[in-house]
Image (cartoon, helix red, strand yellow):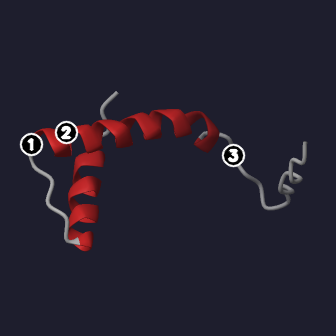
Amino acid sequence: MANKKVPAYVDAACALQGLTLKGEERDRVILQFERLAEIAAPMLAVPIEPDDEPAPVFEP
């Protein structure tokens, strides 16, 4: 699923850092950000209430 905001974000982030990505490099970075957005979507869909407690630190 392509996110229409990702290309603009990648372009702006690169400009702020003085980087130039063109062609296939830019396309690969955009693809990775779209994948990250898909992975994060289920977690971001969970509502967070003001009284929710943070999870404890996992110590094996």
Left or right of residue 38, residue 48 in this image = right
Residue 53 rendering spot, x and y as whole percentages: 87, 57
Q: What number of labels is visible? A: 3
* Tag 1: amino acid: Gly
Give the Cα separation between the discs numbered 1 and 2. Answer: 6 Å
Whether residue 4 is visible, yes or no, is no
Give percent across and percent down for residue 44: 59, 44
Q: For the residue marked with disc 3, what is the amino acid?
A: Pro
Q: Which residue appears farthest toward the left when viewing the image?
A: 23
Q: To which residue does mark 1 refer? A: 23
Name, please, the residue furthest toward the top: 1
Q: Residues within 10 Å of mark 1 (few under 14, many from 20)?
A: few
Q: Which mark is residue 27?
A: 2
Q: Quadrant of residue 46?
A: top right
Mark carried by residue 47: 3
> Which structural element holds mark 3?
loop
Q: Is residue 10 left or right of residue 23?
A: right
14 versus 57 height, above or below: below
Residue that appears at 86% across and 53% down: 57
Residue 8 lies in quadrant: bottom left
Question: Label 2's element?
Answer: helix
- Which amino acid is tagged 2? Asp
Return the x and y of residue 1 as percentages of the image width and height.
34, 27
Task: Choose the circle earlier in sequence order: 1 or 3.
Answer: 1
Residue 13, placed above or below residue 2 = below
| Res. 3 in view | yes
Q: CA distance from mark 3 to mark 2?
A: 32 Å
Asked if disc 1 and disc 2 are in contact, CB closer than 8 Å, the reply is: yes
Viewer-proximal residue among 59 and 16: 59
Res. 9 mark? none
